[in-house]
Image (cartoon, rainbow, N blue to C red):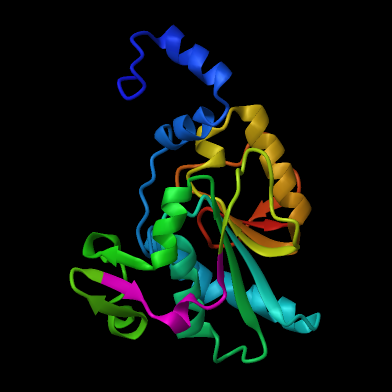
């Protein structure tokens, strides 16, 4: 309101009603964009040890050449790059005929631009396994930049999760601390339905540690032994 020179919430509401572009600015201010590499380590350990190998075996069995993943609400890119690094450092050699592709989407173009640089402050890497630092990052002054070979296969795209989902079939979806935290129950349920429509049977959905799937969450079951990860029935 100060930036726009408005002195009352009603005036800001009127501005929203007459300036459609302001809704994106408001949405960006209403979310917490905390993002770090390897955030919630136990989740990525489960992905690396259990979920991704199972998905890769299923993909190979049906003759697929790619494992299709979606990082919804990717913020400045730490999550999709973590997934790519995990795959290439620990799993790619086991599945040489399979490529990992990660579609990373967010509504905030400034965050996507930051993700496009692939360079981060040390605070974003405090949960990164020590072995990754030299393998997947190069130091540029005060920043740590993801090496080019670990950025391959990561595609950045602006998308509003409340309105749309990718058109491709998916093996893995990471939708953490976004739809099932910020969306009203009805919208969260619709979003889950749209995700389910794109996620292949046997595919995995990862949510935030403190999130629950909305409603009855028909079509999903907890992935055995993995917290916050669900299997598409």
The quarter of the image holding the N terminus is top left
| Occupied quadrant, residue 8 | top left
**Which residue is at the front of the view, 86 or 9?**
9
The structure residue drawn at horizontal position 49% and vertical position 83%, both measured from the top left corner, is 88
Q: Position of residue 186 (x, y in %)?
A: 67, 28
User: Is residue 126 found left or right of 191 in the rendered image?
Assistant: left
| Magenta highlight range | 144-155
**Which residue is at the front of the view, 223 or 98?**
98
Asked if residue 168 is positioned above or below residue 61 in the image, the reply reads above
Confirm whether residue 130 shows in the render.
yes
Q: Position of residue 222 (x, y in %)?
A: 62, 54
Q: Is residue 146 magenta?
A: yes
Asked if residue 115 is positioned above or below residue 100 in the image, the reply reads above
| Occupied quadrant, residue 136 | bottom left
Q: Is residue 192 magenta?
A: no
How many discs appear? 0
The quarter of the image holding the C terminus is bottom right
The structure residue drawn at horizontal position 39% and vertical position 58%, both measured from the top left corner, is 114
Confirm whether residue 216 shows in the render.
no
Q: Position of residue 127 (x, y in %)?
A: 29, 65
User: Is residue 182 found left or right of 186 in the rendered image?
Assistant: left
User: Is residue 198 found left or right of 113 in the rendered image?
Assistant: right
């Amino acid at each position: 309101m100060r930036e726009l020179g408005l002195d009352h919430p009603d005036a800001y509401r009127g501005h929203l009603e007459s300036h459609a572009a302001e809704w994106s600015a408001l949405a960006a201010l209403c979310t917490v964009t905390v993002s770090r590499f390897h955030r919630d380590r136990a989740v990525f350990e489960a992905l690396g040890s259990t979920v991704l190998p199972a998905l890769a075996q299923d993909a190979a069995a049906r003759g697929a050449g790619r494992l299709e993943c979606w990082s919804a609400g990717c913020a400045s890119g730490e999550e999709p790059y973590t997934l790519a690094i995990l795959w290439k450092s620990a799993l790619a050699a086991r599945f040489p005929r399979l490529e990992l592709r990660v579609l990373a989407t967010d509504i905030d173009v400034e965050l996507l631009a930051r993700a496009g640089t692939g360079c981060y402050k040390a605070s974003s890497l405090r949960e990164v396994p020590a072995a990754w630092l030299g393998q997947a990052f190069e130091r540029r002054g005060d920043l740590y930049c993801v090496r080019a070979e670990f950025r391959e296969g990561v595609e950045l795209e602006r998308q509003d999760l409340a309105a749309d989902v990718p058109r491709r079939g998916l093996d893995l979806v990471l939708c953490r601390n976004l739809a099932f935290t910020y969306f009203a129950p009805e919208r969260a349920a619709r979003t889950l339905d749209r995700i389910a429509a794109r996620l292949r049977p046997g595919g995995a959905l990862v949510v935030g540690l403190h999130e629950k799937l909305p409603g009855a969450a028909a079509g999903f079951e907890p992935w055995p032994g993995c917290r916050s990860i669900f299997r598409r029935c």
